[in-house]
Image (cartoon, rainbow, N blue to C red):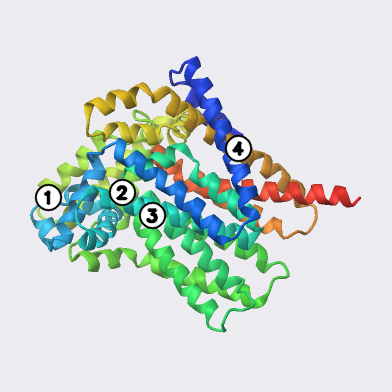
Amino acid sequence: MLLALAEYEAHLTMTTNGLAVASAGLSLLGLILLIVGASYWLSHRGTRAVCLVFSGLTSLKFLAIAWLKIAPTSDFWNYHALAAFSAQGMTWHQMWTRGLLGNYVIFPHSLNIANFFSLITAFLGANFFISQLTNVLCTLLDMWLIYWLGARWLSRQMGLIASLIFYCIPAYWLYSTLLNGAEPLFVTFVLLTLLALTKALQPAITAAPNDPWLNLCLALIATLAANMLRPIMTVWLIAVLLFTGVHWLQTFPRKTTKRLWLYLGGAMLLLTSSAGLNNWLYGIQLAPSNVETTYSLATGTNVATQGTYNAKIMGQVTHQLKVNPTPAKAYSKLAQQLTQDTQLNVQQLQQQHRWFSFIDDKMQQLLGPDYGYNWVLYNLQSRRTGNTWYRLRYFVITLSAAYFGLMLIAALIASVLGLRQLTKPHFLNQYFFMSALLFDGFTLSNLILEVQGRYHVIIYLPLIALIICGIAALKIRYHQSEDV
């Protein structure tokens, strides 16, 4: 409820008008009817129909690409430029010696994002459309992965509902279609982790004896890849650890528990060795992981910018990287300076008794529904298109806020149903429990680190999982009442 209120409060601070609210309301109703109608219709059709609908919905994104021409700026330009340099044969060490990597030496995940795009660029060319195409295809694959997961966990119809809810998120639809951000790739690897781990723990009857172990290896690789793009998979591992611990105390298949522990051990080993892997991959001395962590903490506890990007702190990073003779010296100085900044920020919050208001401000920044609209606006190529897009701001932001707010409310209702379901053993309990763990973990972890609106993309997955679990619980209650 606090999340829903914070998100709604964030939307109330934005200027809007009656026409925008009415138009967004009708559009929201249309999206709900699309999700309900298409999921019901497709649940009575074969895989070919699902393929046609998913492909048709994805093709609509190319209309947006054709209309809203993008000239990338900020991180999006950096990803695109570095990917092009790498694809053209320049080594990462050469880029570093020429100063092309800039402050990314303390953000290895940013280099990894560019590196992932460079693999596609090397084969298909350096046109920015290739990066857009990559993300569009990732979102198509994500729809299928969510569908397969939902069908595997609950039912085919629940999988369809989940995939359509995911597709229709307005802010993410814009962001994943028009920009070359890391989130679509990251979400894809997270979903691959979930599907592979599901198949490893609950293999199909037709699965070969080695299939669970192959899927376990795939889950480990996907976990590492996801963490390379967004270093927050430790939250995922903590959730799996708690989930495993609870089931270890209960009656649970021994083979399943053993594989869970093996996955946890292997994933922790891979994540702890990722710093060395990055240094080997790029052939340069990148900053230790504690430097990036202290930067995120210093930024995330800064009252002046409400935990978002802080130009002053980034200026400190740039300065230390320039004035120190060696990278090791610069990294050591940065770690000390950023730790001091964090301590001063915390002291200020304690002295002013501003923790509650500060966390509320950060929650609004994290759950801001305008990230899709804003990032498109900042990166539009044509001023004429930008003027048109600016006139649509009230409608787009209101629709984005309303849709995401509805997701939060639906997840809250589902959570209440899940708590009632705990009174008796049921297969839904484990899905409710894991979804709640992930939602809480990804949300709380963002409250102490740097936040941006686009960082809440990962929260969509546990939200959708809670929603379909709630729908499944309602269906079960309805059929039980019919039997009575």
Q: Nearer the viewer, mark 4 or mark 1?
A: 4
Q: Position of residue 64 (x, y in %)?
A: 35, 39
Residue type marked 1: Asn
Q: Is residue 129 left or right of residue 257?
A: left
Q: Secondary structure at mark 2?
A: helix
Q: Tag 1 or tag 3, which sits nearer the N-term?
A: 3
Q: Is residue 89 left or right of residue 175?
A: left
Q: CA distance from mark 2 to mark 3?
A: 9 Å
Q: Nearer the viewer, residue 407 or 242?
A: 407
State the residue position of label 2. Answer: 132
Q: Position of residue 254 (x, y in %)?
A: 66, 77
Residue type marked 2: Gln
Q: Position of residue 92 (x, y in %)?
A: 16, 61
Q: Nearer the viewer, mark 3 or mark 1?
A: 3
Q: Quadrant of residue 296?
A: top left
Q: CA distance from mark 2 to mark 4?
A: 28 Å
Note whether 42 is above or below 1 in the view shown.
below
Q: Residue at x 76, y 47 (%)?
A: 420
Q: Position of residue 415 (x, y in %)?
A: 67, 44
Q: Secondary structure at mark 3?
A: helix
